[in-house]
Image (cartoon, rainbow, N blue to C red):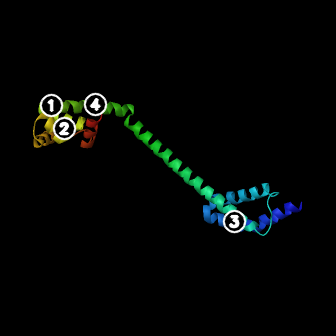
């Protein structure tokens, strides 16, 4: 019975200051839990601990250690939540990009793009496809086709002008380039 009273006195004496200390470390939301966990640990191990002069130092050290654990856990949780939110954001972008309506619109736009590319002269069409669909550099195209780099640049410029004009009532030229890069 005396041990219970000693514990209650210890709790009443140190709880307010330990709570204030915990709040300074972890904030208001977790401070009470930290201090209560420390006193619970003390209660569970009271038969193995000496309640002497060093109990105050032990209590503050225990609050500090638990507070660090809370902060580490909070950091891990925050990082995990951020990653889950990023994954969900990417999923939504993917679903928006590949929704049935978007698929139909993209197919229609791809058909218009293919038709517009088909209207280019044979050499211009070949240069454009090598550049935008196969990702070749101007110098590589020039060497492969036996023409100058300036001629390659002129064909690409002519192709882009034609495609922008033909597809001006659709989305921006960026979408045009995106579609050229998609398989």
Does the rendering let one see residue 165?
A: no
Q: In which quadrant will I find the N terminus?
A: bottom right
Disc nearest the viewer among 4 and 2: 2
Mark 4 vs 3: CB contact within 8 A? no
Disc nearest the viewer among 1 and 3: 3
Tell me the residue at 25%/40% (across/down).
Answer: 177
Question: Which comes before the other along the chain, label 2 or label 1?
Answer: 1
Task: Please state the horizontal and vertical placement of residue 150, each as a whole percent of the image.
Answer: 11, 43
Task: Please state the horizontal and vertical placement of residue 46, each as a whole percent of the image.
Answer: 80, 58
Displayed quadrant of residue 113: top left
- 150 in relation to 45, above or below: above
Name the residue carrying label 2.
163
Name the residue carrying label 1.
119
Tell me the residue at 76%/58% (across/down).
Answer: 42
**For this rendering, which residue is in front, 154 or 120?**
154
Question: Which comes before the other along the chain, label 4 or label 3?
Answer: 3
Real-space Cα separation, disc 2 to disc 1, in angstroms: 9 Å
Name the residue carrying label 4.
108
- 16 in relation to 115, above or below: below
Task: Please state the horizontal and vertical placement of residue 179, each as a whole percent of the image.
Answer: 28, 36
Real-space Cα separation, disc 1 to disc 3, in angstroms: 80 Å
Circle 4: element type? helix
Mark 4 vs 2: CB contact within 8 A? no
Name the residue carrying label 3.
60
Real-space Cα separation, disc 4 to disc 2, in angstroms: 15 Å
Mark 2 vs 3: CB contact within 8 A? no
Real-space Cα separation, disc 1 to disc 4, in angstroms: 17 Å
**For this rendering, which residue is in front, 173 or 48?**
48
């Amino acid at each position: 019975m005396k041990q219970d009273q000693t514990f209650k006195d210890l709790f009443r004496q140190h709880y307010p200051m330990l709570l204030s200390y915990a709040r300074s470390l972890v904030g208001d939301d977790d401070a009470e839990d930290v201090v209560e966990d420390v006193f619970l640990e003390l209660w569970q191990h009271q038969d193995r601990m000496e309640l002497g002069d060093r109990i105050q130092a032990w209590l503050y050290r225990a609050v500090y250690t638990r507070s660090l654990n809370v902060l580490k856990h909070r950091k891990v949780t925050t990082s995990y939540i951020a990653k889950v939110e990023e994954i969900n954001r990417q999923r939504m972008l993917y679903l928006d990009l590949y929704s049935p309506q978007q698929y139909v619109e993209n197919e229609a736009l791809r058909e218009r793009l293919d038709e517009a590319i088909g209207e280019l002269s044979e050499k211009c069409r070949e240069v454009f496809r090598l550049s935008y669909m196969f990702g070749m550099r101007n110098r590589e195209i020039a060497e492969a086709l036996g023409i100058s780099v300036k001629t390659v640049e002129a064909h690409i410029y002519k192709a882009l002008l034609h495609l922008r004009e033909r597809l001006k009532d659709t989305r921006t030229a960026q979408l045009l380039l995106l579609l050229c890069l998609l398989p």
